[in-house]
Amino acid sequence: MSTPDSNNATHADIDADVVFHAHGITKIYPMGEVEVQALRGVDLDLHTGELIVLLGPSGSGKSTLLNILGGLDTPTAGCVLYRGRDLTRATERELTEYRRYHVGFVFQFYNLIPSLTARENVAVVTEIARKPMRPEEALELVGLGKRLDHFPAQLSGGEQQRVAIARAIAKNPEVLLCDEPTGALDSSTGIVVLEAIERINRELGTATAVITHNAGIALMADRVIHLGDGLITHVNINETRKAPHELTW
Amino acid sequence: MRALNHKLVRELWQLRGQALAIALVIGAGLAAVLMSISTLDSLQNTRAIYYRDYAFAEVFASLKRAPDSLRERIAAIPGVNQVNTRVWAPVTIEIAGFTDPISGLLVSAPRAGRADLNRLYLRAGRLMDPDRSDEIVIGDAFAEAHGFQPGDRLGVIIDGKRKQLRIVGIALSPEFIYQIGPGSIFPDFARFAVLWMAPDVLATAYDMDGAFNNVTLTLTHGANAADVIDELDTVLERYGGLSAYDREDQTSHRFLSEEFKQLEQMGRTFSVIFLGISAFLLNMVISRLINTQREEIATLKAFGYSNLAIGAHYAKLVVAIVLFGIVLGVIAGVWFGQGLSHIYMEYYRLPYLHYQLRPVIVLVATLVTASAALIGTLFALQRAVRLPPAQAMRPEPPPVYRATVVERLGVQRWLSQPSRMILRHIERRPLKAALSVIGIAFAGGIVISGTFFKDSIDFMVEAEFRLAQREDIAVTFTEATSYAALHELAALPGVTRVEPVRVVPVRLRHGHHVYRTSVQGLAPNADLHRSLDLNLQPLAFPPQGILLTEYLGTRLAIKPGDTLTIEVLDGSQPVREVPLVGLVQQYIGVGGYMDLDALNRLLREDRAVSGAFLAVDEADRETVYARLKTMPRIASVRVQENSIRNYYASIGDLLLTYTAFIAGLAGAITFGVVYNSARITLSERSRELASLRVLGFTRGEIAYILLGELALLTLAAIPLGFVVGRALSAHFVATIHQELFRVPLILEPDTYTLSAIVILISALVSGLIVRRRLDQLDLIAVLKTKE
């Protein structure tokens, strides 16, 4: 097993540019009488401005890892430090606050609010954020400046996903967590969506983690973390990131 | 199919909250129906059995005095089966420490050991020994009111002579199921008593040796009551006979029948409303519930289950819930029905209760309820199976929304995104929102229709006892007497005003409409006992002609200006024609009213009175009661204050108890509907709300979105519920417009408030339960699942 960073990192010597420092994360789900070990001691750091891809087949533990990073789930053992704050000891209220101010989520199925327009779907988040950008600005960033007042039903799948990205980044989050963002899209639409994610990462410097089982996407990342059976199997570092339009799958 | 059955059981368990709430709606609706119908059935059934087993007579007549030998002639009338001749005597009763006047009716006891008519049901003690002159049996209501036991003594004034009598038994009689004193229409168990004495003892005491003044008889099978009555009238004519009558005009039977009629009308109306409403709500709730199962249905279809198999599966789910509700409803209905019947038995002196629940009623109610549920299921399933499974299993295309009317009016900028979500969600599915509102409104409406009676009854009492009958005491003389009797009353210390009244029993006839009642002759300047016009203003008595209670006008199909035939049932029994000059607003009882002098002229009699209305100084009341007891000419004394109390204690109480049951059930339905609306909205929107939680919304913030919608719908439903409640109440008032009393439609703010409170509390409790569910939303599942 190779580890992406030093196993010996302590709270004190975490670099200032480390957004997440996860150490020895284990997650066990009790499933009736058997226990399913989703994660078996994962160590991972994510740095400011970095774009990583978590790659693995289904059941490899990548979603569990993302959920734990996003404050949606807590590990059975191990610790996750976000900017030095221990997420594993956070209360429900603190986790809500963490998601509210620091994390942007993009889901496979967009999870837009159908009763709100594109602009309002973004506003739903900016209204509760601390230093958000204007919803129009966020939508401009994902190339939807002209479709502000369209309802989800009036948008294509790719456009809906881009609204979801705009919604995720409009609060100016420190991290952007994307769970199979292209999973429900065809490849050409998927590329448009990935371009939006890449642009956010590049222009805003938001640390970004993208989950996928699609190896084709891996080339756009700074680092590709391969997961299998609850463990990090190996890590690839791309010297140069490929632009999404160069990707194929 | 075994797997499907497992799914059924598990889903029932998962849905237990909602299933319970639906069962509550069904159960409450059914309970209201069964309670109303079984109470009436039981009372009617009990009365019929009681009449049969205790040989209640079929024809009744009073007369002045006839020799016992006349009995044979009566028995010889064709069509007469059994004859019972007897004495009955109005008496006054004295109880130490109880100052209010007590009047009583002392009746010859049916002869023991023989198959006599109107037999007594002995509740305690024994029947009197015919050889002992001081033994009596008393009615159980009176005994209960004063706590009398066999062995106690009672002072009774018979024909002016005071006698000390010993109570040996406590009994009930089919003749006195509904017990009211002369001049009253409501029972007063403490101030009116029925007493029985051995026939010979009573004859001696009342100076009726070898004679009788009352006869009752039964008819042979197939005999015509009218023919027997005519013949009996002929036989009794020279003995001062008052017109004979059949059961329909026997006081107890008639009042009881009227009350049963009223109960039947109310029961029928409540049944239709409750069944209708619970069926409507059930249909709505079930079809929404099935809608939330859309994806599962698609999955089953994908596996190759036929539409029929899926339909059967969901039908089973619904039937299981419905059956549970029905079991709940039958248990509650029987329980409430028995409870209510026993409460009624406090007022109707029945010796026992034969509780009866006709299976056909349960069957019909079950069929109506189950059909409503299954039709709701069918429609929802039809929608669900129409979609090809692949499409139903793919993420549903987002539903189409648009900016709401409210927002387009320009208030958009004032609304936060969550508020917009609430408004748009309501406006996008206006039908669904409307159905929820209508459902809650109907539930609120039945709360009103179940509680408005209190306001109406208060209003009736106000009109009857404060505006119309304002006397403190009403006195009835033993027979019509001269005006001189009034001077004697006016001379009593404390009496401030005396007004004469002449009450004459009559049969009113207009065309083929006939009605037996009485006409009251009142002084033209009457100030105590007045009649009110339809606007509740005091009416001046016209010097000619008659006024009729508005109800009677309708019943006789007569209008002012028409001529009415009056057949007097007293004295020389003249038949006269008089013009109807106006209608009187009267909520309790019915009758005709004339100027006293005009009435006396009509009877071709001198100025005579049969009673008087008195105003008495508060401080002197007891003295006046005491003095009145000593006046032999006075048959009965009615204290107005007691009338009001009796009214509340009898009919008022019954009505309020009944409607309280109804209101409680309506409350249960309200809760069931509101809770289900909330739960279904939660299951429809949980994904959206979980997404917002992931995006960093707090629990409170997402609760606002869900509960805000519920609150908005609830608030819209409340005023609509007022409208529905008023309409339902008006319907009730129309259906129970009857002889005994007519209920005015009066809805005070407190009735509306109660309905609003019931809805609000239901909404609040439902909201809290849903809020707890919201706190347990699965945030991770939402990332991976589509709708």
Image: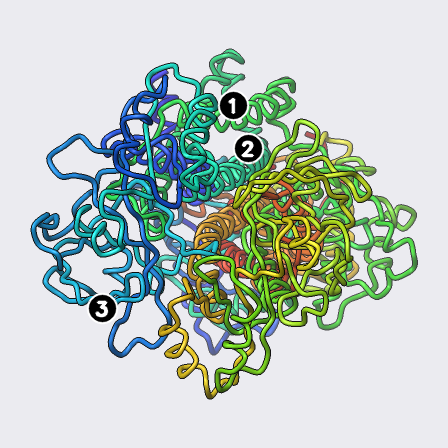
Distance CA(mark 1)–CA(mark 2): 8 Å
Residue B455 on image: x %, y %: 59, 61
Residue at mark 3 to residue at mark 1: CA–CA distance: 64 Å
Instruction: Determine whether, in the image, residue B510 is placed left or right of residue B81.
Output: right
How crowded pointer 2 is (Cα within 10 Å; few <14, some 14-19, many 20+) is rated as many
Question: What type is the residue that disc 1 sits on?
Answer: Ser
Instruction: Find residue B111 and report its horizontal and vertical position in percent.
Output: 16, 39
Q: Are marks 1 and 2 on the same chain?
A: yes
Residue A68 visible, this angle: no
Chain of the residue under the numbered disc 1 shown in the image: B
Residue B371: which numbered mark, if any? Answer: 1
Describe the colour scheme in one phrase: rainbow
* Residue B724 horizontal/vertical position (percent): 68, 47
Task: Determine which of the numbered discs, if any, sits on residue B155 in the image.
Answer: 3
2 or 3: mark nearer the eye: 3
Q: Are marks 1 and 2 in contact (CB under 8 Å)?
A: yes
- Viewer-nearest residue: B212 or B435: B212
Location of residue A31 by image quarter: top left
